[in-house]
């Protein structure tokens, strides 16, 4: 969960649209920017890295930290949608080609333009309008992930209360144990106060805790599979339809989406080059693949077609190891929500300041505080309201997973297209890259439209 917070906090946009370094990352140096040629040796693309910046191994950890997140809980159900273990793994491998490609494209364009954040890369390569659209997508994505976090809090609290009170599913629920009450009280008391500050300095502590929590959840799911003893539904070996396969794609995109944070991570590296970044991305992707595949395969084979969209809800409430996993998730989400909200609020603030032309230096401090309080309350209350009436995380991930496809495919594809057109067009490599950029944009647009339409259709049908 904190990992997903790190994913977006690395896209921080300061007041007035000033790009800031990702909290917890070494500040990039002010070295010169080298514009790489398409026919280079693969080592180009590096802006000036920070003296004593992040080593390659550290960058791998940060990318893994950025990728692993709330989507982990939905992977077993996604494997079921995809048609079982083999189909789910195969779908992952196909999408990983585009995921890794997008990360390399962003590093290439960031090295040429010197942009320090994802939205700055899009703005530099594709223009101001594309940059504004990108910032709007980041705000929507962070908001949707905040809703996901609160849904997770409600689900896990419900199971913990059930375990402590020894209440069965059929027993009447006291008002103080009702999910709507518990999620509201915990959110207002523990999350909301952390959202008001102008700056946040506790991200680095949440990051490590989030990674450990995610790995613990994966380990427990794998161990429980080998111990056995759970009643499972049908184990399917082929997808029921092509539409079902497409329903699994948003979860995979949501799980592997670390692209928004990749630009500041790249610039934070010691001697950032495209070749070194390629090694970092490859290692980080393999680690994430092991975690997500272990969770998806073992979670799905444990419960089969009856697996819940949140796999932890499929386990008994009284299981001690699972209860510890629930506590991990709750504490992690409590610290990750403010980080994610901070990033979304910063993007919205930048958009608003550019739209209105307000000069922050001349603005009275009280006005900024009132605006920040209004933005925070509006964001929090709306996300809480949606989380209360959202039945499971699968519904939210199905919607925002399409936006993840935009960050992985559409924006990097557009950046690559503009990069090639502004560099050289005649070589064979340039033509291949032009074709690949068109494939990325076309596929990303299709996945965005299809996943959003399918998610809306399912919601309408269920209501």
Image (cartoon, rainbow, N blue to C red):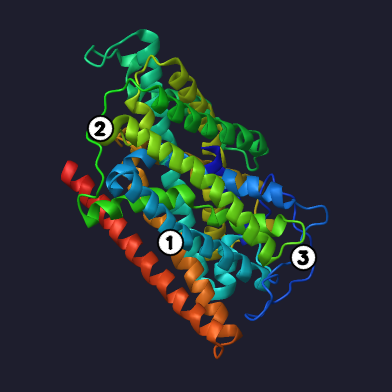
Distance CA(mark 1)–CA(mark 2): 31 Å
Q: Secondary structure at mark 1?
A: helix
Q: Nearer the viewer, residue 370 or 253?
A: 253
Vertical order, 335 against 7 (above or below):
above
Q: Nearer the viewer, residue 176 or 159?
A: 159
- Residue 182 in the figure: left or right of residue 45: left
Q: Are the residues flagged by discs 1 and 3 in contact, CB closer than 8 Å?
A: no
Observer-side mark, 1 or 2, equals: 2
- Residue 206 in the figure: left or right of residue 383: right
Vertical order, 366 against 38 (above or below):
above
What residue is shown with label 1?
Answer: 406
Q: Earlier in the sequence, mark 3 or mark 2?
A: 3
Distance CA(mark 1)–CA(mark 3): 28 Å
For the question of whether residue 355 can be seen, the reply is yes
Observer-side mark, 3 or 2, equals: 2
Give the tally of numbered discs. 3
What residue is shown with label 2?
Answer: 306
Q: Identify the mark at residue 48; answer none if there is no mark.
A: 3
Q: Residue at x 43, y 69 (%)?
A: 440
Quadrant position of residue 84: top left
Query: Residue 102, position in %: x, y?
Result: 52, 64
Q: Quadrant of the C terminus?
A: top left
């Amino acid at each position: 969960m904190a990992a997903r917070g790190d994913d977006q906090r690395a896209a921080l946009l300061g007041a007035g649209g000033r790009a800031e370094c990702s909290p917890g990352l070494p500040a990039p140096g002010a070295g010169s920017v080298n514009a790489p040629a398409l026919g280079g040796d693969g080592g180009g693309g590096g802006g000036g890295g920070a003296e004593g910046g992040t080593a390659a191994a550290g960058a791998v950890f940060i990318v893994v930290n950025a990728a692993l997140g709330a989507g982990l809980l939905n992977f077993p159900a996604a494997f079921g949608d995809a048609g079982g273990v083999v189909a789910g793994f195969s779908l992952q491998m196909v999408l990983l080609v585009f995921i890794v490609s997008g990360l390399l494209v962003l590093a290439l364009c960031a090295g040429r333009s010197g942009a320090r954040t994802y939205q700055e890369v899009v703005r530099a390569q594709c223009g101001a309008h594309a940059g504004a659209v990108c910032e709007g997508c980041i705000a929507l994505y962070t908001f949707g992930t905040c809703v996901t976090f609160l849904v997770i809090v409600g689900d896990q609290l419900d199971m913990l209360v059930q375990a402590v009170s020894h209440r069965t599913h059929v027993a009447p629920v006291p008002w103080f144990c009702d999910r709507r009450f518990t999620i509201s009280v915990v959110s207002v008391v523990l999350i909301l106060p952390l959202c008001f500050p102008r700056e946040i300095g506790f991200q680095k502590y949440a990051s490590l805790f989030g990674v450990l929590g995610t790995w613990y959840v994966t380990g427990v799911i794998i161990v429980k599979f080998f111990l056995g003893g759970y009643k499972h539904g049908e184990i399917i070996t082929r997808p029921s339809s092509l539409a079902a396969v497409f329903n699994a794609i948003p979860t995979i995109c949501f799980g592997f989406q670390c692209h928004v944070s990749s630009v500041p991570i790249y610039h934070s590296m010691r001697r950032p080059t495209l070749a070194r970044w390629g090694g970092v991305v490859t290692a980080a992707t393999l680690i994430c693949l092991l975690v997500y595949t272990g969770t998806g395969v073992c979670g799905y084979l444990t419960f089969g077609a009856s697996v819940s969209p949140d796999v932890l809800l499929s386990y008994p409430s009284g299981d001690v190891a699972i209860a510890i996993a629930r506590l991990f998730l709750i504490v992690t989400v409590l610290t990750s929500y403010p980080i994610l909200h901070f990033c979304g609020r910063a993007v919205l603030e930048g958009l608003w300041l550019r739209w209105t032309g307000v000069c922050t230096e001349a603005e009275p401090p009280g006005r900024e505080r009132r605006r920040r309080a209004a933005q925070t309350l509006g964001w929090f209350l709306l996300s809480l309201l949606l989380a209360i009436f959202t039945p499971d995380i699968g519904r939210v991930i199905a919607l925002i997973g399409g936006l993840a496809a935009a960050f992985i495919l559409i924006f990097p594809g557009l950046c690559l297209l503009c990069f090639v057109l502004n560099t050289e067009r005649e070589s064979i490599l340039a033509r291949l890259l032009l074709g690949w950029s068109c494939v990325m944009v076309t596929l990303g647009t299709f996945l965005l439209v299809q996943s959003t339409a399918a998610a809306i259709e399912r919601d309408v049908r269920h209501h």
